[in-house]
Amino acid sequence: MTEAELLYGIKMSNNERLIVRVHDFLKNINILNWDRMAAQSYGELKYLTRQQGITVAELDLQIASHAKAENMVLVSNDAIFNALVAMNLQLENWYA
């Protein structure tokens, strides 16, 4: 999902330099498959956010769920993810 968002972003940017940089970046990283653990994490996070009245966009919830399932740190400047830290999401903001 994150790869898809990056590809969408560069398509919208129409910035050739950025397009090349993102494609080069994507060539050098492993893309993790969405698996059963990610789906279970998604079900749990979606249930908890709904129960607590927290609205999270579907793609953001899927990204957070995948990071949580893989026991990885999610790096984002998006404030919505702060609400998920209490649900055991590991989060870092490199802009802060």
Image (spheres, rainbow, N blue to C red):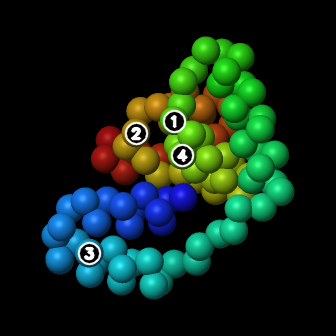
Residue name at image x 66 percent, y 53 percent = 66
Along the polypeptide, which appears first: circle 1 or circle 3? 3
In the rendered image, which residue does mark 1 sit on? 57
Instruction: Give how far across and how far down residue 9 sits, in percent.
Output: 31, 59
Q: Position of residue 33 (x, y in %)?
A: 69, 68
Q: Is residue 8 above or below residue 40?
A: below
Which residue, given by chain and number where applicable, does mark 3 sit on?
19
Q: CA distance from mark 4 to mark 3?
A: 22 Å
Relative to 15, residue 56 above or below: above
The relative height of residue 21 versus residue 62 in the rendered view (above or below) is below
Q: Amino acid at mark 4?
A: Leu
Q: Tell me the quarter of the picture where residue 77 sits.
A: top left
* N-term mark: 2 or 3: 3
The three-letter amino acid code for the residue at tag 3 is: Ile
Q: Earlier in the sequence, mark 1 or mark 2?
A: 1
- Indicate the secondary structure of the residue bearing disc 2: loop
Residue 60 located left or right of residue 25: right
Name which of mark 2 and mark 4 comes first in the sequence.
4
Amino acid bearing label 1:
Ala
- Residue at 17% x, 77% y is 17
Q: Which residue is mark 2?
A: 78
Q: CA distance from mark 1 to mark 3?
A: 25 Å
Query: What residue does disc 4 label?
Result: 59
Q: Are marks 1 and 2 in contact (CB under 8 Å)?
A: no
